[in-house]
Image (cartoon, grey):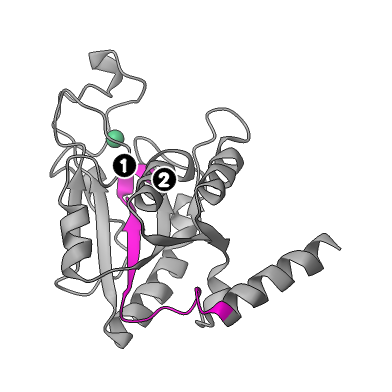
Amino acid sequence: MKLAKSANQTQSKLRSGILQPDKKSVLLVIHLQNDFCPGGALAVEGGDQVIPIANALIRFFATEGFGIVATRDWHPENHCSFEEQGGPWPSHCIQGSRGSQFHPDLKMPPGTLIVSGATNCRKEAYSGFDGTSLEDRLEDLDAQTLFVIGLATDYYVRQTVLDACKLGFRVVVLEDGVRGIDAEPGDSQKALQEMKKAGAVLANSTALGISL
Ligand code: ZN
């Protein structure tokens, strides 16, 4: 019953067109960097599993000429979120380090817009909009709808999506294209429900009719 209901909801959203990317859609690829993937300093379990999905979506958006923006965590080496500075995380994504680079399997077209976040050593920033040019870049692209994938569901994705909803963007979070840290079990699920409550649509990338 549950499945049938959710399939119906997806169908009605498809009919309303919200899952159909168009020229006012932007693919927002969040923090697909080495340090958040297995083997990295702050690895998200299964983080690299979203890369094939990301690549398929990137290919689709690039072919259609729709916008693609990639965010990256881009910390100075003494960032306040690091354990040595009294923060909660091991040091990660230090500007220019191997860990800060995008995962080598991620295939982004040359010229993809990159937005660097959390660059102020005294301030943590989980939202891609916090202290960055992301809102301006999206405005330049005339974006109305954001299709969101990346890491980590319960931190950077969550806060970026909540801010995007607040800013008035339509937001589609592609659940198979995100993975979470789950410091407390269930954090990612809780974050997804919070995003939904804020107005984001939760969907599977297969609902876009893109072959992976
Ligand atoms: Zn960080």
Residue 169 x %, y %: 36, 60
> Given the image, on which type of amino acid does mark 2 rest?
Leu
Q: Is residue 49 above or below residue 93?
A: below
Q: Which residues, given as a range, are shown in magenta? A: 16-37
Q: Kindly indicate the quadrant of the structure image that contains residue 111.
A: bottom left
Please state if 175 lies on the left or on the right of 52 as rendered.
right
Quarter of the image for the N terminus: give it.
bottom right
Q: Is residue 34 above or below residue 60?
A: above
View extreme (right): residue: 1
Instruction: Give the residue drawn at x 31%, y 56%.
Output: 103
Give the mark, 2 or 1, whose residue is nearer the N terminus: 1
Residue beneath disc 2: 162
* Front: mark 2 or 1: 2
Q: Is residue 32 magenta?
A: yes
Q: Is residue 4 magenta?
A: no
Q: Kindly indicate the quadrant of the structure image that contains residue 48.
A: bottom left
In-front residue for pair 101/81: 81
Q: Is residue 136 above or below residue 156?
A: below
